[in-house]
Image (cartoon, helix red, strand yellow):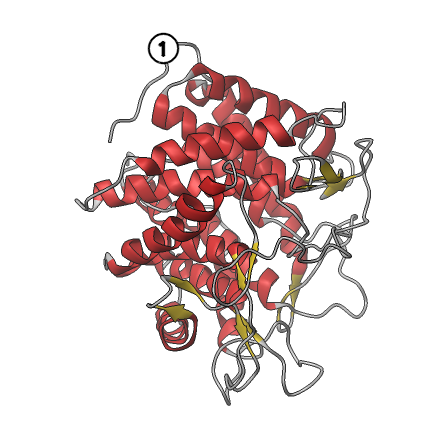
Amino acid sequence: MDTFQPAFSSWLNAPAHQHWLAAEGLRLLAFAKASKLPEGFGNLDDKGRLPANGQAETMNTARMTHSFAMAHIQGLPGFAELVDHGVQALSGPLKDAEHGGWFASAHPVHDNTGKAAYLHAFVALAASSAVVAERPGAQALLDDAINIIDTHFWSEEEGAMRESFNRDWSEEEAYRGANSNMHTTEAFLALADVTDDNRWLVRAQRIVERVIHGHAAANDYLVVEHFDRDWQPLRDYNHDNPADGFRPYGTTPGHGFEWARLLLHLEAARVQAGMLTPGWLATDAQKLFDNNCRHGWSVDGLPGIVYTLDWNNRAVVSHRLHWTHCEASAAASALLKRTGDEQYEAWYRLFWEFCDSHFIDREGGSWHHELDPHNRPSADIWGGKPDLYHAWQAVLIPRLPLAPSMATALGQVSQSAPV
């Protein structure tokens, strides 16, 4: 696999742009520190405050732990304690000591709280990054997360993740989701680096073969999100709740961009490991990006990428979510590195110009997480500013190689720095 240095003047090679990304990362990190709660990390409001009754959640705790670990790996002071706090929370109050696995939040409201693959993928990702950061307790947490994935979630027969179970693992949800498998692919890339075990790259490719090279390719490279237990598409899923934050109706352009980037990371990781690597990984990544740009960007006459499309590629939910644009810019940077094609430079600049103008909140801090169909800040789908993970990764990915995974790559950069 070749990567290319663009023949034109690219922002990726511009020192000023690299400094801008780094400065924006520091601003995001400073805001997110306030999310600490006694039992993990919680959701900040649009002013960066925790609500009086704020409760630690596994998703945010895992994402914050992963994000703060990458800050610590870079040599930024003030984050080691936050990583340790996250590891302790995931090893304690957020963990189900009786049945194994993780609750969605501390002190679940009833004893049959379910176990979701989506959350467990983030626990594994957080643990792997904390291991790279060499924090106490991280290896035990990682071992636990891997055991749960192997024991309950990974289906060797399907080559994908089962979706969710009840608390004691005795009942399984009759659903399969692209979203949970997407974040599992991200986690498996990190696990391959941290464990030095290529089985995670084999599993990641099996997921991609099913969800993208199979189903998405058959749908004009727009990601089919919802399936029954036999992997038959559920096209009417959540038709009556189209703006669901995790399982929206129709297709989700933001996930198309995220998958495109992950395919390129997987390709680079397999090449780096000396594994047989199919050429369709890069081809599918380009088609995902191109078609989601075509159908998602400015389809209602205003700039920005809509949240969801119906099966005729018409906008359903025209809100613009910040994470969608983070993933779009990150995918553009990855494709630019992989191909050297100037069109990806144009998209990369366009996405960052839009984020700078509409999402970055220089008065209140962090980013507006959501814009309404007229590109005004709103909170119809996501309230407040709880998410560091997407924007933080968006400012890191353009500065890193396609492989290894982010935490490992940052560790290598730190080790090779001049003394």
Residue 345 image position (x, y, % from top left): 49, 19
User: How many numbered discs sit on the rendered protein?
Assistant: 1
Q: Is residue 236 left or right of residue 276?
A: right
Report the quarter where the N terminus lies: top left
In the displayed structure, would residue 167 be above or below residue 11?
Answer: below
Front-lying residue, 390 or 203: 203
Front-lying residue, 330 or 131: 330
Residue 213 seen in the current view: yes
Front-lying residue, 134 or 94: 94
Q: Which residue shows up at 64% across the image and 51% down it?
A: 387
Q: Is residue 194 left or right of residue 398?
A: left
In the displayed structure, would residue 192 be above or below residue 147?
Answer: above
Q: Quadrant of residue 297?
A: top right
Neighbor class of circle 1 (other Cα within 10 Å; few <14, some 14-19, many 20+) is few
Q: Is residue 115 left or right of residue 161?
A: right
**What element does badge 1 sit on?**
loop
Would you name the residue on which mark 1 appears?
7
Residue 150 image position (x, y, % from top left): 35, 73
Residue 82 seen in the current view: no
Q: Is residue 314 left or right of residue 65?
A: right
Report the quarter where the C terminus lies: top left
The residue at the far top in this view is 8
Q: Which residue shows up at 34% across the image and 38% down it?
A: 281
Q: Label 1 amino acid?
A: Ala
Front-lying residue, 295 or 401: 295
Residue 313 image position (x, y, % from top left): 65, 35
The residue at the far left in this view is 274
Residue 303 image position (x, y, % from top left): 71, 24
Q: Quadrant of residue 347?
A: top right
Q: Which residue shows up at 33% across the image and 51% down it?
A: 205
